[in-house]
Image (cartoon, rainbow, N blue to C red):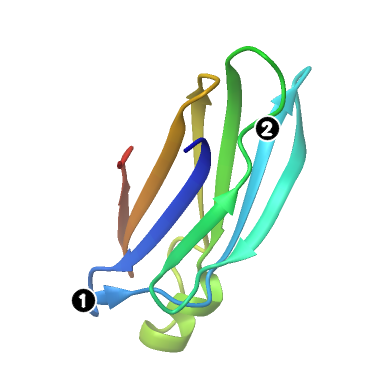
Amino acid sequence: MTGISAHVLDTARGRPAAGVPVTLDHQVDGSWQRLAAAVTGPDGRVTGLPGPPGPGPATCRLVFAVRDYLAAGSGPAFFPEVTVVFVTTPGEHYHVPLLLSPYGYTVYRGS
């Protein structure tokens, strides 16, 4: 399986974060171009995002728009958006989990 997927887990509530908008962009000549947009499902996951086009490594970013999700559960968002920039290699799958709390977050390459 190739492509990119993401998972948002709300560590303060101990459950997946549903309804979080996520965009996927890739960098071309110093500018970002949109590849896809999605919203996390009830399990906090976004699947089926495409891999970056092109034959070689690519710089991509996932932007998690968490402001409204956090505001609905814990008040104003200290981090209204989380941007994760990473480099891909053709033929691989990239899973990027976001562990989210009102005043912090952690990301890593999952499996």
The residue lying at 63 percent from left, 42 percent from top is 50
| Neighbour tally class for label 2: few under 14, some 14-19, many 20 plus, Cα within 10 Å | many
Q: Quadrant of residue 57?
A: top right
Q: What's the CA distance linking mark 2 and mark 1?
A: 31 Å
Q: Which residue lies furthest to the top in this view?
A: 56
- Residue 93 vertical position relative to residue 29 in the rendered view, above or below: below
Looking at the picture, tell me which residue is in the foreground, 55 or 63: 55
Q: In which quarter of the image is residue 27?
A: top right
Q: Residue furthest bottom?
A: 72
Residue 13 place in picture, x, y as percent: 24, 80
The residue lying at 45 percent from left, 71 percent from top is 77
Looking at the picture, tell me which residue is in the foreground, 55 or 15: 55
Q: Split into 4 quadrants, where in the image is the C terminus?
A: top left
Disc marking residue 14:
1
Q: Of the residues shown, which amino acid type is indicated by label 1?
A: Gly
Q: Which of marks 2 and 1 is nearer the N terminus?
A: 1
- SS under mark 1: loop
Check disc 2 and report the residue beneath it. 26
| Neighbour tally class for label 1: few under 14, some 14-19, many 20 plus, Cα within 10 Å | few
The residue lying at 60 percent from left, 49 percent from top is 49
Residue 35 place in picture, x, y as percent: 73, 43
Residue 73 place in picture, x, y as percent: 39, 86
Q: Of the residues shown, which amino acid type is indicated by label 2?
A: His
Looking at the picture, tell me which residue is in the foreground, 51 or 25: 51
Residue 82 place in picture, x, y as percent: 49, 52
